Image: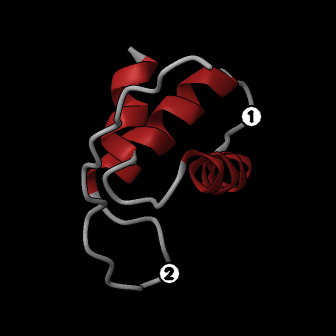
Amino acid sequence: MRSDLIFGALTHVKNRYELCQLASKATRKLHKPNTRLQDTTNEVLDRFKDAAPMNGQAEAPVEKIQVQDRRAA
């Protein structure tokens, strides 16, 4: 499922907006004619899950932050 690929890719990218930007650029560059765009997008996210998509920048994996419950005002 694509949600599993997205959460796997978020281990190497700071935030979801940045992931979206990087994935769209990579999908445009890696897409082959006569193939489904969805398959190319899944392949890109799978690659992001395995390796950091930044240009050689060694970044530590994103730390998990606990979300505090908010009270409604």
For residue 55, which numbered disc appears in the image? 2
Q: Is residue 35 visible?
A: no
Element under disc 1: loop
**Number of the front mark, 2 or 1:** 2
Whole-Å distance between the Cαs marked 2 and 1? 26 Å
The N terminus, quarter of image: top left
Label 1 Cα crowd, 10 Å radius (few <14 / some 14-19 / many 20+): few
Q: Amino acid at mark 1?
A: Pro
- Up-down: is 69 above or below 59? above
Say left or right for 56 vs 27: left
What colour scheme was applied to this rendering of the protein?
A: secondary structure
Of the pair 68 and 15, the residue shown nearer to us:
68
Query: Would you identify the image quadrant in which residue 57 lies?
Result: bottom left
Of the pair 21 and 34, the residue shown nearer to us:
21
Q: Which percent across, then down, holds residue 73?
A: 62, 20
Q: Amino acid at mark 2?
A: Asn
Element under disc 2: loop
Task: Kindly check if marks 2 and 1 are in contact, taking CB atoms under 8 A apart as contact.
Answer: no
Q: Which percent across, then down, holds residue 41?
A: 57, 34
For residue 33, which numbered disc appears in the image? 1
Q: Is residue 50 visible?
A: yes
Of the pair 70 and 32, the residue shown nearer to us:
70
Residue at the location (65% across, 49% down)?
17
